[in-house]
Image: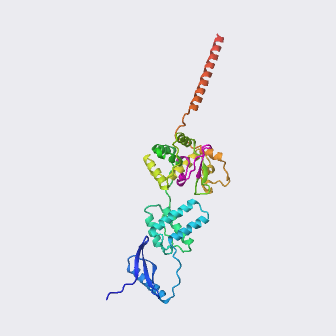
Amino acid sequence: MAKHRLPVHSRPSKGGRYWICYVRTPDGRRLQRALHIRDDGSKESERAAIAAYWQEQSRVTAGTETRRSKTRTLRSALKALAEAKEVDEQTEHSQEKVTSAGKALELFFGDQHDIGSITTEDLVSFAAERKKVVENITIKRDLQVYSQACAAVGVTPAKLPGIGSIQAKPQEPFTLDEVRRFMLATTPHGKLLAYCLHFLGLRNSETRKLAEPDWANKRVWCEGTKTKHSKRWVYPPDEMWEYMEAMRSVGEWRGWPKLGKQGVESFVKRTSARAGLGHRHPNDCRGGFATRLAAAGVNAALRGAIMGNSEQTQKIYSQPHLLDQELADASRKHPRIRPKPCTADASQEAAQAAKTAVGGTVTALKSLRKGEDSAD
């Protein structure tokens, strides 16, 4: 006689294989139950699942099973977290981080996975998989989002695993000579983006949040999102403004480049490689911009306001308001990487100055000769 098989099964998920079972109610219904036991292929795991099945079946048969609460799926928990951050008026940058981490968690565990069933072992597996594509600091952010999502739906999160050092890549600010080499290696199509990164000191996300230039006042509105100071006017230095005006005068102005985060990073990486500058990041452009302004004598308060830094970063508690003209003058202290073009007006002025200088010299010689004649 064949041995009767118990209705206990192992099913795969993004986070591994887990045991489930089917129980019979007194009225003949067949219900599925998740046992929340990981199937690691051992006999101990199978025996634990069988024991859990008998407990579930006993409760159902005795009619003592309490009504189960609705499963808190990973997607519903992340949605609750996003809504809570929106109510708290978190910045758009903060909400984008939640969205990015949520996609990574859903890709690994599955959007319908019960968030309360995630264990520390599962999080270790998740971190190991993520390390193949991102830095530790990003993994830490993902785990923090998981913990916050649990709190948003009233679930006690599993203990977060250690992930090692979370030091970000050290910044390597571009020097003025490196900016020249970068601009020479840039294709014509990417020239405007290169100017935005090196001459405006924008964050990666801000390169696609620029409004149409205020041509009359030589400024551009940036709809930044990282801090409350990120929404600001930016003032292109003279060299960049001359390039923009030249594009506009020949009908080539088509607005600002709209590359995504990965696109901007790829642009900087490829152009830096062509210029022989090694592996560089968009944040290195921002750091170089701040360094050059500091070298030009722009104080920390003005630099912070120009770059949209937080109050702690720019240290302007004693200077809560900075005039637009101050910001414009400070921005235009950025050094040029090319000599100032000689315009027609400038040529005429130079010629007039030379003519005046020659005329003065001739007059002086005539006076000197008259004096010599008188002496004779």
Kindly give the residue lying farthest to the left in the view shown: 1
Quarter of the image where one finds residue 11: bottom left
Residue 115: percent from the left, percent from the top?
50, 73
Residue at image x 65%, y 47%?
A: 324
Q: Residue at x 50, y 88 (%)?
A: 63
The image shows residue 200 at horizontal and vertical percentages of: 56, 48
Across and down, in percent, residue 44 comes to: 40, 81
| Figure label count | 0
Q: Residue 238 lies in magenta, yes or no?
A: no
Say which of 319 and 34 sits in front.
34
Q: Look at 44% across and 50% down and name the residue there.
A: 270
Direction from residue 341 to residue 185 in the image, left or right: left
Q: Position of residue 96 (x, y in %)?
A: 54, 61
Q: Is residue 137 above or below residue 351?
A: below
Residue at image coords 60%, 26%: 352
Q: Nearer the viewer, residue 81 or 288?
A: 81
State the quadrant of the N terminus. Answer: bottom left
Write the start and end of the magenta stretch as one range.
198-222
Snapshot colouring:
rainbow
Magenta segment includes 214: yes
Magenta: main secondary structure? loop
Asked whether 66 or 200 is in front, the reply is 66
Against 177, is 20 above or below?
Answer: below
Q: Report whether 319 appears left or right of 162.
A: right
* Residue 152 seen from this side: yes
Residue 81, placed above or below residue 168: below
Classify the position of the C terminus by image quarter.
Answer: top right
Q: Can see residue 140?
A: no
Q: Is residue 191 left or right of residue 238?
A: left
